[in-house]
Structures are given as C-alpha cells and as structure tokens.
Amino acid sequence: MKRYGPVFLALITILVIFAVAACAKPPTDEMARATDAVTRAQNEPNVGTYAANSLRLAEDALRRMNEAAANKKYDEAKALAIDAANLADRAISEAKDAETQVKLDASNMIATVKSAITEAEQALANARKVKNINLNTNAIVFEIDNAKKLNQDAEAALARAAHKEALDKATNARSSVSSAMGLISEAARESSKKK
C-alpha cells in the first residue's frame, strides 16, 4: 500500500476546501424571503408606531445578511436571513397585539371619562348649593368643557381607527376632569374650615 506524504495530504485538503467553496451558493431563497418579510413589516402602517424596535432589529439583520452574502459568507447570510424574516414577522405580530390593546384602553378610557364628567358636573351643582363656598366656577367649567371636547375628539379618533390618538386625547380629557374635581374639592375644604 502506497503512503502519501504530509505535503500531498495538505495539498489535497486545500483543493477540497477550494472545491467546496467554489460550489457554495448564496442562499437566494432565504434572502428573498427575508427581504419580502422586512418590506412587508415596513409597509404595515402600525409597525412603526407599536413595534419600532423589532422592525429596527429586522432591518439590521437584513443589512448584515446582505453584507455577509457580499463577502461570500453564505452560512452566516442564511442564518441572518432567517433571523430577519422572523424578526419582521414578530414586528407585525407585536404591532397588531399592541394596537388591539391600545384600542381597548382607549375605549375604556373614553367610557371612564364620560362617567367622570357626569360626576364632576354633579359635584359642581352640589358645590354651588353650599353657602359661602368660594368656587372658581369659570375654571371648573372650563376644565369640564375641555374634558368633554377632548373626549369627543377621542371618540372620533377611535371611530377612524386612530387608536393611539384616541387614547392620548381621552387621557388628556381625564386630566381635565381631575383638575375640575380638584378645584371643587379644594373649595369645599376651604369652605368647611370657615365654619
């Protein structure tokens, strides 16, 4: 049996490595799926609002995938393509879940504010009956009216599926009602001290 020397074996090993490298091809299917997934996430209207971090991660993985493919690091490019696609899908899912939650929160806040407005109006009416109370009626009425307007704007935003805007407006309406109630409570405390 013929023995081969270490130089011959090293040469054969190098030739095999070059042959394998020459046969390696970019993972075009995975890269195309990743590109499509990230593009789909970028075009979803609420991903930027509710899942911006996941979208950035997907875009970064896509960028690194393209760099790896350009440098003929095809195994790395394939892994990054899979990551980019998964991150893009996750961004879309996160955005849908978050939007659903914000819609629910906005709807609940609007209902809470409606009830609080009714309570504030009743508290104002009761406070006006108290003798010698020093009510800042203009400020209280302003806050209640502002709450009503903001809550109506929140309802309109909710109706046109601008859920985050609806939640923001309803939250501001709640603050106005709280201010009105605070003014009423403060006047009532001051009045009770005078007795």
Image (cartoon, grey):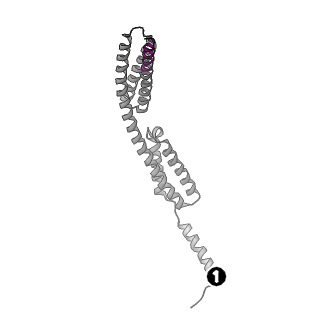
The part of the image, by quadrant, that contains residue 41 is top left
Identify whether 188 is placed above or below 30: above
- Residue 192 point in image, percent of width and height: 42, 14
The kind of secondary structure the magenta stretch mainly shows is helix
Residue in the picture at 40% in, 38% down:
99
Comparing 20 with 138, the one in front is 138
Q: Farthest residue to the bottom: give it.
A: 1
Q: Is residue 184 magenta?
A: yes
Q: Is residue 123 left or right of residue 23?
A: left
Residue in the picture at 49% in, 55% down:
81
Which quadrant does the C terminus fall into? top left
Identify whether 91 is placed above or below 184: below
- Residue 187 point in image, percent of width and height: 44, 15
Q: Identify the element where label 1 is drawn.
A: helix
- Residue 18 point in image, percent of width and height: 58, 70
- Amino acid type at circle 1 is Pro
Residue under pointer 1: 6
Magenta highlight range = 181-195
Crowding near pointer 1: few (<14 within 10 Å), some, many (20+)?
Answer: few
The part of the image, by quadrant, that contains residue 17 is bottom right
Which quadrant does the N terminus fall into? bottom right
- Residue 65 point in image, percent of width and height: 53, 54
Q: Is residue 1 left or right of residue 45?
A: right
Comparing 186 with 166, the one in front is 186
Q: Farthest residue to the top: give it.
A: 132
The part of the image, by quadrant, that contains residue 138 is top left
